[in-house]
Amino acid sequence: MGGGEAGGAGRPLPAEAQCNASGAHGVTRPTSTESESAPLNWFGLGALVLFFLFFIVLFVAISFPATFHNPVSAEMQRQHPAIRALNTISLLAIPFMLAFFPLYAALRRVKVYEQFVEGAKEGFQVAVTIIPFLVAILVAVGMFRGAGGIDLVTQALRPVLDLIHFPTDLLPMCLMRPLSGSGTLGMFTELVKEFGPDSLIARTAGTIFGSTETTFYVIAVYFGAVNIRRTRHAVPAGLIADAVGIVASVIVCRLMFG
């Protein structure tokens, strides 16, 4: 018995036994689908610095063309420098993100394409999981809006909003925003058609649309998909964030465009 145990200790364990042993000690070995990232070296840091410098120079060239002795259009001369800077940021934000994340992953030696394919597979499974909750929340929002609930709340809050000089034309959109993104987009389109795309109402509505989130929609769909029944502070935190975004949008748009 003792010789057998001693001889067995010298022989290598089978692959299955090694996996079980490593799992018993709490060590997780990476699977073939996982990608091991490497730390950034000096070349990677230099590439990131050059990347950021490129976008900084591009930002200055677009926002303040006179810096590089480029002609400035009459429309840009009429705009406030802060507005030109914000317009440039909105113009460069998506190209910056689309270029930064693949570049950073490649510099960390992450297999970008393989990881993208794996994420796409997981995204499809998530989409299938949330379809029942998506249908439920869309039906509930449609019934609430069709029954005139938004109009009743708007009429009840209109006197209070008039006292604090809040644009009452934005109230239906603000009430719809936590419930449905498509419904909010429809109301935003109606405001643009009624007041014009360059009006203060339309600019404020667009800022509110980008500064808030569909709180109840997100909670109903994603919390339901993972079977979370007690949302705790998620709903109050989301609604407070939406309220802050609405108030800040009104204040900033009045300061910049009013």
Image (cartoon, rainbow, N blue to C red):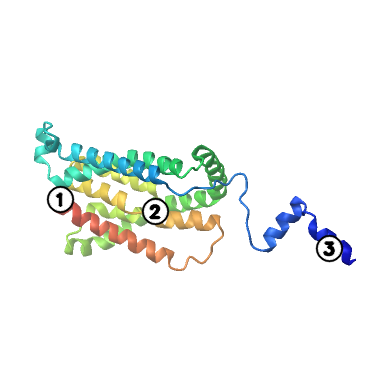
| Mark 3 crowd level (few <14, some 14–19, many ≥20, 10 Å Cα) | few
Q: Position of residue 158 (x, y in %)?
A: 23, 60
Disc 3 marks a residue whose amino acid type is Ala
Mark positioned earlier in the residue sequence (3 or 2): 3
- Looking at the image, which residue is at 19% across and 43% down? 195
Q: Residue at x 13, y 50 (%)?
A: 258
The picture quadrant where one finds residue 250 is bottom left
Residue 137, placed above or below residue 123: below
Residue lying furthest top in this view? 71
Mark closest to the chain's N terminus, 2 or 1: 2
Mark 3 or mark 1, whichever is nearer to me: 3
Using the numbered discs, state the Cα–Cα distance from disc 3 to disc 2 in whole angstroms. Answer: 65 Å
Residue 178 rendering spot, x and y as whole percentages: 37, 55
Residue designated by label 2: 214
- Alpha carbon of mark 3 to alpha carbon of mark 1: how far? 81 Å
Q: Amino acid at mark 1?
A: Met
The residue singled out by tag 3 in the image is 6
Quarter of the image where one finds residue 6? bottom right
Q: Which residue is mark 1?
A: 256
**Kind of residue at disc 2:** Thr
- Is residue 133 or residue 145 the one in the foreground? 133
